[in-house]
Image (cartoon, helix red, strand yellow):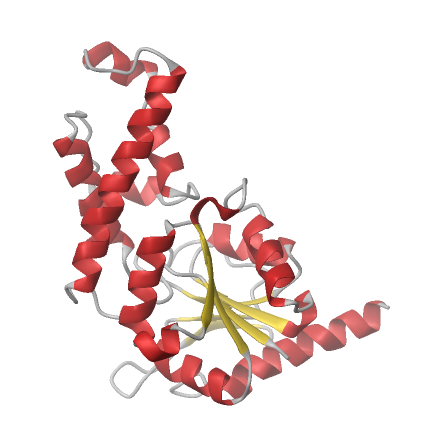
Amino acid sequence: MPALIFDCDGVLADTEMSGHLPAFNQAFHEFGVPVVWTVAEYGERVRIGGGKERMRAEFTPALAARWPGFPRSDGELDDLIAALHRRKTEIYTREIDAGRIDPRPGVARLAEQAAAAGWRLAVASTSAEPSVRAVLRRAVGADLAARFAVFAGDVVAHKKPAPDIYLHALTELGVPAEDAVVVEDSAIGLRAARAAGIATIVTVSAYTAEEDFDGAALVLSSLGDAEEPARVLAGTGAARPGREVVLDDVDAVRRARTAQEGERS
């Protein structure tokens, strides 16, 4: 049984700029941490896989020099980052549940087609699991979301671009790499999926449109719908989607990957 595995942020919804960024900044403010990320600065931070890891990157000697409240030990720093991240997740999840961030085009349609055809469905993300589940419910509805396996947060030790989250997903789903297709939006996500041996479709997002997606089976503006048709930005020719990416397009990518493995063997 094939599997369709979605990343979360930037794929199910374009959440980074309008969701995660303000939630990080509010959490910093509430805890008295003198850090405010601009849109451009956060564009650099999204290249780091994992929210806690992004926060940790701010706790430098330069911050210690200007903030008397800087943690005095590694243990205190770990505790602060954990608390910051819990609060940030609460803020972010509240915004998602309030319906303030719209799903990306075509996600629900493609997931419904895959479910009807008997494909396994999953989300594999470096974000915290409550955040991922909130976005998933918003993107596809509660009933269909219940059919997804969710692999998120600290379920693996190494975040993207390491392949661990996708290798873990394959193991838990019981699906070989050649029978899965990933939908990603970022270069680090593409690297993670490709390192796990999985064919990958990229739908670029606000922060990732200029990144290098060499190795992707398809690079698209989105999965497409009536109001926002999909545009093919790059691809290998295995699939030639029209205005909307459908399951046949995804299966063409999967079958091309399987054929390549057969040629290698």
Residue 53 appears anywhere in the view: yes
Residue at x 50%, y 44% (from the top left corner): 159
On the image, the x and y values in percent for residue 113 come to 45, 87
Relative horizontal placement of residue 28, taking residue 211 as reference (left or right) = left
Number of labelled discs? 0
Q: State whether residue 229 is above or below residue 168.
A: below
Does residue 123 appear to the left or right of 73 in the view shown?
Answer: right
Residue 207 visible, this angle: no
Q: With respect to residue 106, does 159 lie above or below?
A: above
Q: Is residue 57 left or right of 5 when viewed as pictured?
A: left
Using the image as rendered, state which of residue 43 and residue 48 is in the foreground: 48
Is the N terminus in the top left, top right, bottom left or bottom right quadrant? Answer: bottom right
Q: Residue at x 59, y 82 (%)?
A: 251
Q: Residue at x 36, y 12 (%)?
A: 73
Q: Percent from the top left, x then y, of residue 94? A: 18, 56
In the image, is residue 72 above or below residue 7?
Answer: above
Residue lying at the far right of the rendered structure: 265
The C terminus appears in which quarter of the rendering?
Answer: bottom right
Residue 77, how many percent across, how many down?
A: 34, 21
Which quarter of the picture shows residue 35?
Answer: top left
The quadrant where residue 11 appears: bottom left
User: 228 or 175: which is nearer to us?
Assistant: 175
Q: Position of residue 79 (x, y in %)?
A: 33, 26
